[in-house]
Image (cartoon, rainbow, N blue to C red):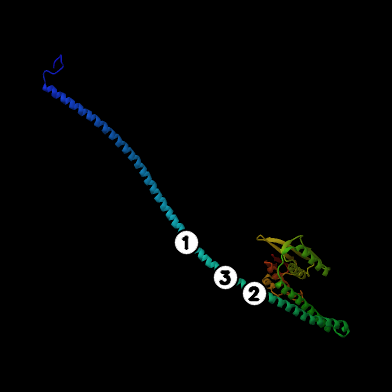
Amino acid sequence: MSVKTGHAIQHNPASTKIADYSTALLNILEDFSVEKERLERTQRAAINILEDFSVEKERLEGTQKAALNILDDFSVEKERLEGTQRAMLNLLDDFNAERTKTETANRELQETVESLRIAKETAETANRELETFSYSVSHDLRSPLRSIEGFSLAILEDYADKLDEKGKDYLNRVRNATIRMGSLIDDLLKLSHVNRSGINRESVNLSTIVKGIAAYLISQYPERSTEFIIPDNLISECDSRLLNIALENLLSNAWKFSEKCNRIVIEFGETYRENARVFFVRDNGVGFDMAHAGKLFNPFQRLHKTEDYPGTGIGLATVKRIINRHGGQVWFESGINKGTTVYFTL
């Protein structure tokens, strides 16, 4: 190369080749650098894609899990719905069966109501006829009884001087028989009336009723030494008229079967048995053997001779009917010469 001009004077082939290699190498390095940057960008893009793919994969897995859970829930809900459907079908079957039974029961009830209506009308007709018959029989029986008693009394009064003691005794027996027959008719009518009459429940002071009956008995037999024990204000819901009949029978029996005692003690009161309120009438009379207690509530059943203790045998039967009409029970406690207690509930 010339120092002055700067142009090459001589040419060195080796140098030229080296320069070409350098240039080529530089170009290659530049291309490599560019390619490296492109690869790095590609790598970063790939990494981003992989990261996005990973996120998307997690999201897809979450979606898949959610879908599986939904499917599980759907399966459970389906089973529950199927169970509900079966239960509803069973309910419908039960409802149809119950409706059929109800319709059958209604038909039977209507038939029963109709039968009861007919029976009620028949019973009412029979009761009216029985009442008419009872009073007719009572009148027809009383008329000859009054005649027999009247003529017997007239004979005793007008022809006493012509009769011996035996004749007078016969006439007295006739009169006593007519009186007893009259009492029997009265008691039978009471029993018949009790069976037919309705129940009118009201608040009744039983103590007042018993005190009235006791006062009447004492007035009839003032010579007897008698003590009535009656607490005040024993109140019960019952039919006043029917309970008056029942208590009159019970107290009259207590009075009658205690008449041979030196001192008669009759008590009316209340007690409780198995939490149930129980009323009682107690006396200190002759009592009776409890082996025969069952038949005393039957009409015309007696344990003592009429000559010893007069009566018709209807009173206790009437008492039982009255107590039964009130939905109650009546029973005895007694012993020979140990008095009697009659218990009853209402």
First-in-chain label (1 vs 3): 1
Instruction: Please name the amino acid that badge 1 sits on.
Output: Leu
- Mark 1 Cα-neighbour bin, 10 Å: few <14, some 14–19, many ≥20: few
Foreground residue among 275 and 81: 81
Foreground residue among 220 and 259: 220
Residue 119 is marked as 2
Q: Is residue 11 above or below residue 36?
A: above
First-in-chain label (2 vs 1): 1
Furthest toward the front, the residue is: 5
Instruction: Please name the amino acid that badge 2 sits on.
Output: Ala
**Quadrant (top left, top right, bottom left, bottom right) of the N terminus:** top left
Q: Is residue 157 above or below residue 120?
A: below
- Mark 2 Cα-neighbour bin, 10 Å: few <14, some 14–19, many ≥20: few
Tell me the CA gap for discs 1 and 3. Answer: 27 Å
SS state under label 1:
helix
Residue 89 is marked as 1
Tell me the CA gap for discs 3 and 2. Answer: 18 Å
Residue indicated by mark 3: 107
